[in-house]
Amino acid sequence: MKHRISRRDFIQQSSMAAMAFSVPFPKIPEFLKNYSMGVVVHSYGMRYGGRLKSEQFPPFLNALNLMKHCQKIGAGGVQTMVSGWDEDFVKMLRSESDQGGMYLEGSIGLPKDEGDLERFEREIKIAKEAGVSVFRTVCLNGRRYENFDSKNQFDEFKSNAIHSLEMAEKIVRKHQVKLAVENHKDWKAAELVEILEKLGSEWVGATVDFGNNVSLIEDPNEVIETLAPYAFSTHVKDMGVKEYEEGFLLSEVPLGEGIVNLKKGMDLCKKFNPDIHFSLEMITRDPLQIPCLKDHYWATFENPSAVEFAKHLAMIRKHEFEGKLPETSPLTTDEKLTLEEDYVQKCLTYSKNNLLT
């Protein structure tokens, strides 16, 4: 069922959320531990770090707060930032993950230059003590079609990104941990594969994001097929699309309500990496505008295919999300946080009932 976001809905959602917090969640069955869905920290983009202040939803101030909450709601692990950890915190985090039977993956910034290598290696070493063996990273924090005005700018970014990855590879190889590069609205799937192949390292692979590349005019299911052989970690999400005057709107939506073939994508990742963890990234926010009908959008792309572009727009029209896409800007703080929590729990329930059997 598709969602129309209204204040009346939030009266019901708030009541449901209150009930969810008051009822203890059962311990994860032993047979499900290797298959349960974890949570990416960005699923709590409004709550983590106290970005929005609320007494009803106390902030997650660190990875330990996040892990305890995610265990309570039945998640199998977390993927979270590793910066700022010290020895005492690492011991507490390791103890919590071991006792709860939860996996722990890291998220780390690439070294910007040789002067940043010490920071990068320090974070790798201390997170490894906490039990982290897979580190997700990104080459671009923004979005390709918003950050760059020309192909030359993008090519310079690409050159710097490859240099950062080459520096990082030496460190992760030394410490024998995996570095997983996300397709983060920067690389088309084939571009990321080309970079990984050029590096040629068993220690550097991909964080396969199930939905980001819709913004780059790529079919999400084909993207997963392309990147699955390199998968070290995942961002499992479903995507809703809707036309607007300059292109289309794109939103993460609760699992099962969008255009991604989730089960097939997860099966593919598992086929190539039997030890992979599935991590939910359900970002609750206003729809992103993908202005693919504007000239500037195409500034960094070579020879866009008119046929592929037409197919993409036809797919959007055919599978357009019913009703309104999720929207947070009209909501109060508690309504925003209620929706964020509701969506995370809804996705975890869907995954247990439909994806992890």
Image: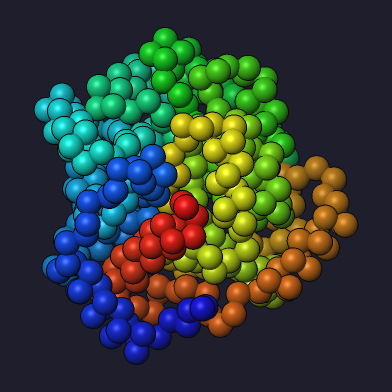
User: Which residue appears at 33% of the width and 56% of the height?
Assistant: 44
What x and y, as percent, mark residue 266? 55, 46
Answer left or right for 287 relative to 308: left
User: Which residue appears at 68% of the width and 42% of the height?
Assistant: 225
Answer left or right for 119 relative to 278: left
**Total marks in image:** 0
> Residue 282's image quarter?
bottom left
Answer left or right for 271 relative to 245: left
What x and y, as percent, mark residue 87? 15, 24
Residue 319 visible in the picture: yes
User: Which residue appears at 57% of the width and 17% of the height?
Assistant: 201
Residue 78 visible in the picture: no
Q: Residue furthest top?
A: 174
Q: Is residue 333 above or below residue 227?
A: below
> Residue 93's image quarter?
top left
Q: Is residue 192 above or below residue 198?
A: below
User: Which residue appears at 41% of the width and 29% of the height?
Assistant: 134
Q: Nearer the viewer, residue 325 or 22?
A: 22
Q: Residue furthest bottom?
A: 8
What x and y, as percent, mark residue 77? 32, 43
> Residue 205's image quarter?
top right
What x and y, as percent, mark residue 355? 50, 55
Answer left or right for 217 relative to 238: right
User: Is the image coloured rainbow, by chain, by secondary structure, or in one colour?
Assistant: rainbow
Q: Is residue 197 above or below residue 64?
A: above
Q: Nearer the viewer, residue 299 or 54?
A: 54
